[in-house]
Image (tube, rainbow, N blue to C red):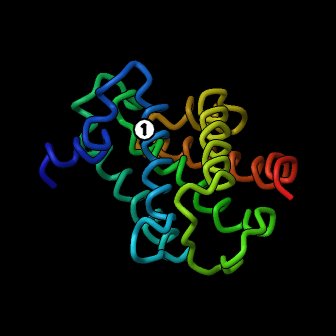
Amino acid sequence: MNNKISLQIITMFGIGRLTKIPGTLASFVTCLIYYILMSNLIPFTISLEVYCLILCILFFIAVALIDECSENFKQEDSKEIVIDEFIGQSIPIIFLSFYALPFLKWKGIVLGWEKLNYPLFEPKYIFLLFICFILFRFFDILKPFPINLIDKKMKNSWGVVLDDVVAGIYATLSGYYIVIPLFFE
């Protein structure tokens, strides 16, 4: 793939180069993207299976592109590379959006492995995205075991993406078992 296009993808079209906190900005933009995709703002809905398939494909593309572009950065896990934040932040958003529905108890939304179409300004869904954002950033910055081990030992493109995937899984589990039951019915 063209190196310029690859760089655009792994920096989320330049978001990774905008601030001193590119990971946080990329996570926030990811939340906005899913807010639009899962709302009634768009005329179609996407199933959980499709989100998971796209995320898995994106994982392998990200690993390949980071490996391809590694010579453009001073360190392997450069702050400019934020596609890993998109992937990691996507995990709690996707799974909590589908599996938190029994707690949210909205009328007119089919529960389970079905398609979503949230009301655009639904406060509970906005709060759910906020929870996903905070939890993912907490685990991505704190790096508890085994995230810290992956971050220290896997100094390649797999490690760049995998530590964020594990942070996303931690955020999902924390949200599902601890945070959501505290705030939702």
How many marks are shown on the rendered structure? 1
* The quadrant where residue 22 appears: top left
Query: Which residue in the structure is indicated by mark 1?
Result: 26
Q: Residues within 10 Å of mark 1 (few under 14, many from 20)?
A: many
**Residue 94 point in image, percent of width and height:** 58, 61
Q: Residue shown at 49%/31% (left/top)?
A: 24
Q: Nearer the viewer, residue 148 or 47?
A: 47
Q: In which quadrant will I find the C terminus?
A: bottom right
Q: In which quadrant will I find the N terminus?
A: bottom left
* The quadrant where residue 96 appears: bottom right
Q: Nearer the viewer, residue 168 or 162?
A: 168
**Residue 28 point in image, percent of width and height:** 48, 39
Q: Residue shown at 60%/41% (left/top)?
A: 133
Amino acid identity at mark 1: Ala
**Residue 16 point in image, percent of width and height:** 33, 32
Give the answer, above or below, for where 145 lies relative to 111: above
Q: Residue shown at 80%/51% (left/top)?
A: 180
**Residue 176 point in image, percent of width and height:** 78, 55
Q: In this view, does 79 lie to the left or right of 95?
A: left
Give the answer, above or below, for where 37 lies relative to 27: below
Q: Is residue 98 left or right of residue 152?
A: right
Give the answer, above or below, for where 162 lies relative to 138: below
